[in-house]
Each structure stands twice: as C-alpha cells, then as structure tokens.
Amino acid sequence: MNDPAARPTRAEQRRNTEARILAEARGLFAESGYDRTTIRAVATAAGVDPGLVMHYFGSKELLFARASQPGSPPLPGGTAAEVSEQLLDNLRGSLTEEPVGSLAILRSMLTHPEAAHEIQAASRAHKDSISQAIPDDEADLRAAIVSAALIGVIVGRHLIKLDHLTDAEPERIVDLLRPCVRSLTRADHADG
Amino acid sequence: MNDPAARPTRAEQRRNTEARILAEARGLFAESGYDRTTIRAVATAAGVDPGLVMHYFGSKELLFARASQPGSPPLPGGTAAEVSEQLLDNLRGSLTEEPVGSLAILRSMLTHPEAAHEIQAASRAHKDSISQAIPDDEADLRAAIVSAALIGVIVGRHLIKLDHLTDAEPERIVDLLRPCVRSLTRADHADG
DNA sequence: TGACTTATTCAACAAGCGTAGAACGACTGT
DNA sequence: ACAGTCGTTCTACGCTTGTTGAATAAGTCA
C-alpha cells in the first residue's frame, strides 16, 4: 500500500501536483511579481492545465496568498545591543538565501496592495518589538527607519540586483551595516 | 496674436494637452506602477481619447519613458565628509517632496525591467562618484549599500507608507541616518 | 464487477488591454 | 476662399487574461 516505489495513491498524487503548482507559483511570483505572472504560465511550468490551478486554489489572488507565506523571522527582543545583533542575524539570513515566498511578497509590494499590506504589517510587528528596546521618544521612527533600510538592502541584492551588492559576501554587508543598526537602535548620535 | 486671454493657437493647444496627458500619466504611473496603469485610464484622466495618447507618444512604453524622467540629483563628490553631507541633502529633498517622475520609476522598479535598469544605472553613477571619496578597497560595496538603504527609506516613506516614516519630519530622519551614512562613507567601523 | 468519487483536461466565455486607421472638423497659410 | 494641415474622436481588430462548466479517464470502495 505505502510502497514508496509503487504508483502513488490518489491523495498522494493530489498533494504532489498541488505542491508542484505551489512551488512553480512561488518561483514565478518571486521572479516577475503578481501582475506579470499568469495562471497559464504557472500551469505550464507545473505541467498542468490552467483549470486545475483554479480548481485547487480558487483564484489567482488565493494562489498568491498561499504562495507568498510571510515566513517571518523570529521577532527580536532584549537589550538594544541584543536587538541589533538579532536584526543583523536576520539580515544575514535574508542575504544568503531568502525564502522564495518572501521574495514573492517583496517583488509585488510596490504594485500589489495586498502585498504592501503584508509588508506594512510585518514592519509594524517588527517595530513593536524593536522600539521597546530603544530608550528614546523617537523609538518608533528609529524602528521604521531600520526596517526600511534593511528591506532596501535585501531588495537591492535579490530583486534589483545592484552591482556590487549581488556578489558581496553576506558577512561583509552585515559588518558594514553593523554601525548603522547600532546607531539607530541606540539613543546616541552625534552631529557635527 | 499672443493675447493670453484669447483662444490658444494650435501649437499652444497641442503643447497644452500633451503636457496634461504627461502630467496625468506621471501621477498614475507613480500611484499604480506601469502594469496597472492603462493608456485608457491616462486618457480619461486627461479628458482625452486613448488614440490621442498613442498619436502623441507612440506607445505605452514611450509614454512611460517620457513620464518617468530620472531627474537625478547632482552627483556627490569631494571628501568623505562632504559626500555624506551631500547624500543627506539629497535624501532630505527626496523626503520632503519627491518628483512624481522619480516615484513612477521607483514604483515600477520591481516589476518593469526598463525601470529596474534605470535604477541600476542611477545607482551605478552614484557609486562611481561616491566610491572615489572612500579610502577602502570595499568602496564599491559601501556605495551600493548606502544607495540601497537610502532607496529603502524613500520607498518606505512614499510608496509603502510605513507607519511612522510617513509622518516624520524629514530633518529627523536625516539626523537619525547621519551616523549611518558617515560610517558607510568612512573606512572605519568597529565590531564587537 | 459496478457505482461512485476525483484528478485532470478541453473548450469557451466575457472582459480588458494596446494599438491602428479611417473619419470629422476646426484652424492656418496662401 | 480654398487647399491643406492637424488636433481629436470613433470604431474595431487581435490578443491575453482570469475564470467556468462540461467532458474524460482513472482510481476507490462496496
């Protein structure tokens, strides 16, 4: 019955193709964004009829929602120094290999309202857990800035593919950004 | 002949509607991106027939090219300290009111290849003039990082509208980012 | 085996898109 | 005034899209 070499059962078959469709959808959404990814293209990539995609996922919108699961990294917490090091750890992870689902959201965040909302929500959650560690009345703003800047770096590397950002060793980028993150999570900054 | 109150001449009339179309196109491209902005919507917003838009601009692609003129800020140069202050000046300008043409490019940079190329080119030009002021063999990487991070902040404020980033005073954001930019344009950074 | 479910495909619809070309009518130079 | 330019609109073509419902064929269970 459960012989792995045998012809797969019906339920297995279904989960199989459903997973294959989902994987191809993730890839295409991450590569081309929501609008430029057609259900037909997903179906073709998965070796399947477009109608089947609809039958399994209901609509393009629902397919996108399933394909772009936030997979949000653990929220930082603790002292300011700890928070900044956790932020840099997350950054390092996102630089080495970003999960395709996250890239799908990032790719579409400027043109697809739903994706934008998810980014806002994620950034808001991030902010709440960061700003508590910052002894400053501008803590919320600081948290928002560090979110935006780090998103910019990830987007620049994976999606826009900025020249020297794509090839660089993740650890180098993290090292170069460490003073930035620290100055933003601490309340001290000198000008002049 | 040139009585400003009189009925406009043919050439004036043309420049008039052409400018009106271009303005509406800029607005819509900045608001919705390339794909979601239809020529029909631009025409309707300008109170004009879609065919006229084609007749004046040739194609949607050409219209986008005209509507999203880079309007790149003056390239920084000089010593490291001067460069970082110029970068922050540009940032302040982009935070107070970004020209709609630039927002059109930024909005589409993740989904429209042409827009992505323009961002890459702009970032490359930026890099060349920044990295010369940085006494470091990682100068190119530093320049790319600062570009990406600043783009992230601008995008977070104007396009994604991150919570506390939208309301904040530009000068506050600039002040908070000053240590960041300085640490990236200088060759010194401590870790530990 | 036979009844039933279900994974999958086929064919087609309605809508929206960019775009082309003919047509109209007012302005313009001679 | 006449011929021609030109701003502008109308209509329509061809294409792609998301989505649907019927049809097909294979697996499943009594």
Image (spheres, coloured by chain):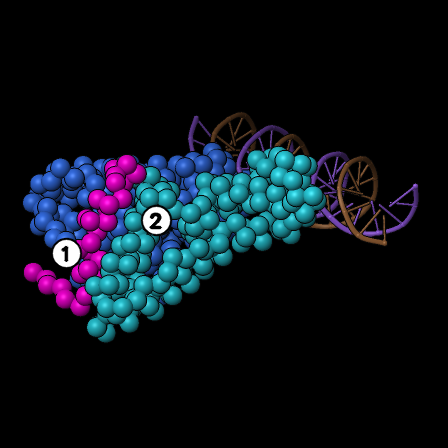
Chain colours: A blue, B cyan, C brown, D purple
Q: Quadrant of the N terminus of chain A?
A: top left
| Disc number placed over residue A1 in the picture, else none | none
Q: Quadrant of the C terminus of chain A?
A: bottom left
Q: Is residue B135 magenta?
A: no
C-alpha gap between disc 2 and disc 1: 22 Å
Q: Secondary structure at mark 1?
A: loop
Question: Looking at the magenta stretch, what is its main secondary structure?
Answer: helix
Q: Position of residue D28 (x, y in %)?
A: 43, 36
Nearer to us of marks 2 and 1 is 1
Q: Position of residue A143 (x, y in %)?
A: 20, 43
Q: Chain of mark 1?
A: A
Q: Nearer the viewer, residue A4 or B20?
A: B20
Q: Position of residue B181 (x, y in %)?
A: 22, 58
Position of residue B46 relative to residue B22, above or below, is: above
Left or right: residue A60 compared with residue B135: right
Q: In this figure, which residue is indicated by the disc labeled 2?
A: B94
Position of residue B180 relative to residue A15, above or below, is: below
Which residue corresponds to the image point at 15% horizontal and 40% vertical from the top-left?
A139
Q: Secondary structure at mark 2?
A: helix
Q: Nearer the viewer, residue B100 or A151?
A: B100
Q: Quadrant of residue D19?
A: top right
Residues at marks 2 and 1 on the same chain: no
Q: In this figure, which residue is indicated by the disc labeled 1?
A: A192
**Where are the magenta residues, as a range?**
B164-192
Q: Position of residue A58 (x, y in %)?
A: 47, 34
